[in-house]
Amino acid sequence: MANHHDDLDDAVLCAGSLYAYLQRYSPDLALLRHPDYSTMNQTPSLLSTQQQIMHGTTILALRYNDGVVIGSDTQVTAGNTITGYMNKVLDISSHCAIAISGTVGVAQELSDRLRIEVTFYERINHAKLSPQGTANTLGRMIKANFAAIQHGLVCIPILATYDFRSHQGKVFSYDLIGTLFDTDYQTGGSGGQRALSIIEEKWGPDLHKDDAVSLAVESLVHASRTDTATTAVDEENNIYPIMKTIDREGIANVPDNVLKEIYKSIKKNSPRKRKIQTRGA
């Protein structure tokens, strides 16, 4: 006789995913429900200002010769106020991570749902979900979040993973409606364009891991010089970016002492800041 777990597995397989199963049989599970954004117009005090909503800032990912680097600064802002610091690079599986920027609450929900979807797929099918399958799943979630985007609750993450078939790292990015882009590198958040300018200038397909990490840190430092919402490094308070590498061995955190030495090298080799003179009255 089949046990309860077998019945659950069959039900989930018929539904197509854990999320679809819970929508059908347990819609009261708040973690996996789509929020009802139709009532947001009734709360203008919340939506009329970004001062009350926390946002993550600059994120990035770039491939190197046998893996991928994914990272971010740690600063979180609400309007023009720094509200704190947090990890914005979150593990999804043993060989997959997501970098989040935009509205923090929405981003955390997306990452939690993606992690659960991937975990259940792998347990039921006894096989890893492919990088493309993971990326497609996240794309559907972003598209389903479009109602929130229309109310200003924007979250556009970057997904990084390792592909055992091609033996290389993969970087996936999205637009506002979940359109999927498979690319060599990508940035996002308020300082994303500044960071991207450095990566575009120096990236190459034969980049080694250590050089890729250094390039990622340099791009964040460059973004922080003109983007007030990004703090790449604060030596006085011992604040450094979050950097992770993903290769066939799995996900590895780049330790702060390594990031500190990279930052020292960047400062040593950086041109002096341009002096700005003001005229007297």
Image (cartoon, helix red, strand yellow):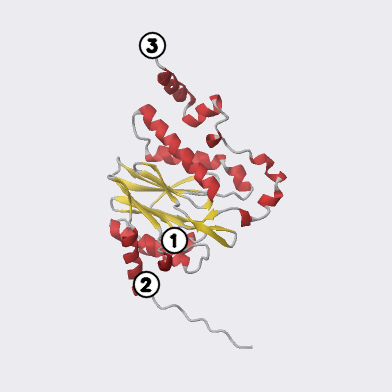
The mark closer to the camera, 2 or 1, is 2
Q: Amino acid at mark 1?
A: Leu
Instruction: Give coordinates of residue 226: x percent, y percent.
Output: 50, 68
Q: Is residue 48 left or right of residue 228?
A: right
Q: Which of the two labelled residues, at mark 2 and mark 1, occupies the earlier sequence position?
A: 1
Q: Which of the two labelled residues, at mark 3 and mark 2, occupies the earlier sequence position?
A: 3
Task: Kindly state the secondary structure of the residue where label 2 is placed.
Answer: helix
Q: Which residue is under mark 2? A: 267
Q: Amino acid at mark 2?
A: Lys
Instruction: Give coordinates of residue 176: x percent, y percent.
Output: 55, 48
Q: Which residue is under mark 1? A: 196
Instruction: Give coordinates of residue 190: x percent, y percent.
Output: 52, 59
Q: Quadrant of residue 26?
A: top right
Q: Amino acid at mark 3?
A: Met
Question: What crowding class fits label 2: few (fewer than 14 Cα within 10 Å), some (14-19), or many (20 or more)?
Answer: few
Which disc, if any, is residue 1?
Answer: 3
State how many labels appear: 3
